[in-house]
Image (cartoon, coloured by chain):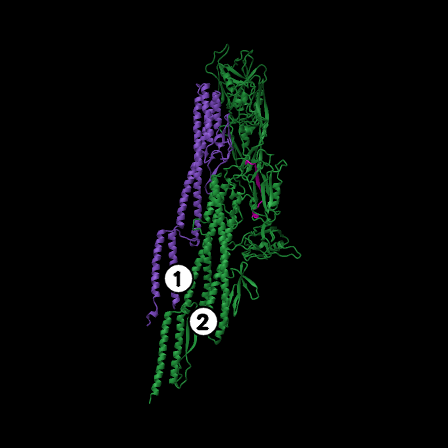
Chain colours: A purple, B green
Amino acid sequence: MRITLNSIYSRINTDLNRLTESLDKTNASISSGKIYRLPSDEPVAMTHAQAIRNAISDTDQYQRNITYGKAWTTATETTLTQVQDRLLRAKSLAVQGINDSQSAESRKAIAAEIKTIMEEVATLGNTKLGGRYILAGSRTTDYPPGVTPLMLNKDGTVEYNGNQDDLKITVADGTTQKINIDGHSAFMATGVFDGLKLLNDGLNANSRGDIEVALGDIDTAIEKVNSLISQIGAQDNTLTNKTDMAFTLSLTNKERLSNIEETDMVKAVTDLQTKQVSYQAALGAASKVMGLSLADYLK
Amino acid sequence: MPGISSFLNVAKVGILAHQNNLHVAANNVANVNTEGYSKQNVTLSPAYMTPTSFGPVGNGVNVTDVTRDYDRFITTTLFDKTSVMSGLQTRQSGMKLIEGVVNEADTNGLNELLSRFWTSWDDVANNAEGTAERTSLLNNAQLLAGGLKDRYNQLLKLSQDVDQNIQASVTELNKLTDQVAELNVQIVAAESGHHAANDLRDQRDNLIKRLSEIADVSYFETQRGTYTVLIGQGNPLVEGNRSWHLGIEGNGVKWIGQNGQRVTLSSEDVKNGELGGWMAIKDMVKPPDPAVLTGSQVNTASGANIKYSTRWNQIDGVTVTGDFSIRYSGTDQNGLPITGQFDYHASPESNATVGDFLESIRTAFQLPGPPPVDRVRVDLTNDGRIRITDIMPGTSPISFNIESVQGAVYGLNLGQFDKAYPPNYLEQINTLGTELIKLVNAQHSQGVGLLPLKETTGNFAALNTNQPIGLKASGLKFSDEVKNGSFQIWLYDKNGQVIDADPTTPEVNDPLTIPITADTTSMETIRDAINNAVFSGTTTPLGLSARILDGRLVIQADGTTQVAGFGFSNDTSGALLALGLNSFFTGYDAATIDVHSVIARDVRFIAAAQVSPRGTDSLTSANMTREPNRPLGSVVKAGSFSISIYDKDGKMVDLDENSVGVNPLKITIDSTKQSLNDIIAAIDAIDGLHAEMDNGILRVRLEQEQPEPANNSQHWASVALGDDTTGLLAYLGVGAGFSSTQPMNAINSVTDTTKPLGTAASGLAQFQKLKVGSFVVNHFDADGNNIDSRQIQVNPSTMTLNDLVTALNAIPGVSASLSTVTIQGQTQHYLSLTNTATGQTMSLSEDTSGILNALGLNYVQPELAGSFKTDRMAEPLNNIKSDMNAGTFNIYLYDNNGQFMGVHNIEVNPQYDSLSDIAKRLNDLNDVKAWIEPDGRLHIETEGQAAKFVLADDTTDAPGISGFLAKTGLSTPPGGILARANNLNALTMRDLSKHAVVNLSDATLNEAYHGIVGTIGIQSRSFQQDYDFSKAQVDELQQRRDSVSGVSLDEEMANLIRFQQAYTASAKLIKMADEMFVTILETK
């Protein structure tokens, strides 16, 4: 076959072009750290990478949500534990008050402390986190002046102004998790104030029978608050588990992403070297071929 | 005879021939870099010989021709492949531009924007009241809308840039065709001497090559040596000396004929070359032609695409079993409604075809005559889609939608007509935008922000406000999202407190419900429904007014009532989406998407919340009921009860020394002053008797230390309480154990007097506690002597209450009867025993069967205990007065969608009913569970179908007396409340990111975008690979062409030397001839 001058030069051009292009690609993949610059470089990998990036973004958000939610559960747990402390104190006062040796006067004195406990519990019921009442259902702000979620009236009755809504956060794909305990569940349905009020009234009226019944009530309330504490504790644990899961998932995804889109440096550098060598060889060969002409040998 | 002169002649022609050879070789060398140049050769032939006696003798050489080394087959193939290659190269570079628009290699692409938009909702959900979170969401939403718009505009810009490239290609092609025609002329002229015009031909081939690079033209050589060049489906570009041009008109490339006729060249006609490449790229990014509506559905009949003449029952996947009708609607060139219906009649034997339907559409669009004027062309595309083309464009683009297919046909889907099909990349980005808007707005429109709305204006203008919003004829963009259903408007006062639109049901708050029927409710219907709405049961308007402004629905609180704002909820109809009310995004696709200006101005209007629904799924009463088994309406009145004591001999002990005979001790109660503690103290004060409240339960027992018995008496052995007129004993749950004046009333009831008492069927609550045994009925005379004792045998597995009554009545001095009461359809029977023996006292004793306790009676024994727990023992007994009227309350049940399921009426008869009875009554209802918690609270929750319940309509209250619900502290949310921390809409919104969208082939929005990027990447990559392959092919062909036609310098050099030597030799011949002449001439 005749090889013409054009053939030789266009082949040299084509081949050198191809080599430089491939060199450039390898070089770019090393300098950018990614195997692609455009979707067409690795379309399938890019599609996967996008999905993984979404997943990472989701899990990062879930971790943020959980951090937020844990602040609530922790604050709720602390508050309820404090309520329980107050109830335990009330219980020991009740036991003291039930004693036959107590006089009407000494019982009145105990009643005064019970009154204080009621006020303290009411204050606990109005605990705020970041400016939001945490034990008021979804009515966390926006109360008229002088109104709070839990209001202790003069006569010892309480009024709950919040609602019974759950507050939920997203903790995983399509999964929400409750992070609050509403005031109705915490203070009304547990009978905290029923027991304390009966105790207070019983002590004031020097009615041993009532103190005895109130003691039972307070025991029930302690039990109920206890179960709420374990409930919120369980919620807190679930959040901890979910955050661990999200963290692991995020890590796995980041690893997958790096496997998919990041340049394998060792391989890339080796490739670059190989390509460099072949480029040099091609240049050498080209210069040799280009130097050859019959004209040089004719005198 | 050859001679010297002929020899000289041979030398001369030799020199000339080699000179020509050298010249041609030199020309070859000179043209070594000329594109398209074919190596030329001189054809030599021996000159005509001279016949001699010894045969013919040659006369040297003749130059007969200069030919070019040329292989037609290789050249033609090369041009073909060049065309393909250049098409691919163009596509490749075009795709690189498209790729650049959706490049996600960088982490700040649209994917990231989508992701951030979704996750922002989580931040808002975490702190729904937070302005910072809302602002960040707004920011991300604006970035997303901007990002989508930007992608759309970049592709659109690309589409416009491509136009310029197409224009350039067309201009060059036109110039080239002119040149080819010109060369045709020159070649014919130059070749009149029957010698090929090599250079002109090379030049012409070169033009053809360039033409091939521009478009996949086909060409052939005529006998006269001219080229005929064709494009597309045989449209001539060059024929002889004539050339035709292409032009760009409207959106298309047209071939312009001799007489000015136009033929549209599609990308199907021009597949390759730069023009074909750019046209293909254009197809990928061009916006749809608004004048052409193409169906989204490919309809085939047995694999082949449907045709005009295809009968309905021949279409694949379509079963026709009888009559059916297709309803359609749309808007015409002036935006006026078009509606129509196509009816298919199955019998007699129907020959109706798809074509009949197309005709029906065409007729519907006609301008009424006479004669009617067609305004659209309706046909089928090659792949079987219905296509409607606007042939008389007016002020607004036409629209069309198949609204319903009803009747005996299954599987018929003619598609939608709102997009370009098949969708190109621009359209895919657009669809992404459309679906994002639909998804987000549909959810957002049903939510509420931190503030009620004062006024809201729909995003979408209807062209025809009197047309149903569910029909395309209305001109609403999302009309096909409207279904039969309803949406609700809640009303609020200036403080954000809900205002009940239906004061006739005060227990719950009611919204204004706007019912929507997709094919009848128009925008005007909705406007009127809102304007005419009144507070139910009154004629007072709600204070909401609606109007239509430029085709958009505007709703506002008009300030005529205390209604200052409103909020939407529970849209099951899609009407809010279609009208664009309370939306998050405005616009309808990627080109038009934007964040609603109301939200952009005030982030408080971001609807993160949902109006709280009515009712609750679970409720525990706020107030404790100390004793859930005690009748609710227990009352202790002033009066007395008696204590009766018996000695070891069974004789009654006289406790009342002031009266004649042996009498029980009567304890008188002043209920306004005395407390329970006082009464207990009074009993306890009796020597030998101990009474106490043990954890709220009354206990009475005989003391160990007994006082010295009086004359004729033994030590005390047992005690009983009875003769109660105050109700205190019933309140404490102590059954009567004796009777002198007052009847002994059982506390517990039996529902069926004919069923054995030891079975559940009897309705006796404590039936399981009964044993086989007996009890005794005693009578005492006025001196306390037991004068009569009768034993009654009890076999709980056979004895019914009726049997017991009979047995008791058989005893002299005893009258047993049943008092009967019916509550909630349940008849309850209470046993009542009356002592009929005058002057005698009756007592019950020695119960070994447990029957007396089970019925709530008692008997004489050393120790008594109440069964009902009590508190507030220090307060006057009057306070026990737990007044409550007999009455009822209702429990309303709602399902998951807030739809009313039913109402149950619960009777409360406070005289008999305890909280436990009410709990049981509620628990017996379907879908409701109720129980009493250990601390005496009623807990109610829904189960099964029901999701929420509302307790209301309590008639047990009376002025100054709170009813059952208020007393127990049972209250259910009345609905409509705006709670600022409510994040339900935000959570749902966040979930939409995982929502599979039907119009995106069941992918989520993110996935759909990944799909677009992936498709573009793969498309681009495949063009690149095709190009690489094609380039290799072309290179190979080029080399083969060069090996035939190309100039090899070495070869030419060698030839030059060869020709030079031949030339030298020929010159030598002259010298030789000269010498020969000299030799001859010098011969002397």
Seen from the viewer's position, the closer of residues B378 and B934 is: B378
| B993 left or right, relative to A13 | right
Q: Chain of mark 1?
A: A
**Residue depicted at 33% across the width and 58% down the height:** A277
x%, y% of residue B525? Answer: 62, 44
| B103 left or right, relative to A286 | right
* Residue at image mark 1: A14
- Where disc 1 sits, the SS reads helix
- Where disc 2 sits, the SS reads helix
Between the residue at mark 2 and the residue at mark 1, the CA separation in whole angstroms equals 28 Å
Q: Are marks 2 and 1 on the same chain?
A: no
Q: Which residues are magenta?
A: B478-496
Type of amino acid under label 2: Asp
x%, y% of residue A143? Answer: 51, 33
| Of the two numbered discs 2 and 1 in the rendering, the one whose residue sits closer to the viewer | 2
x%, y% of residue B489? Answer: 57, 40
Answer whether residue B1045 is magenta in the image: no
* Residue at image mark 2: B199
Please identify the quadrant where the N terminus of chain B is shown. Answer: bottom left
x%, y% of residue B1039? Answer: 41, 66
Answer whether residue B483 is magenta in the image: yes
Type of amino acid under label 1: Thr
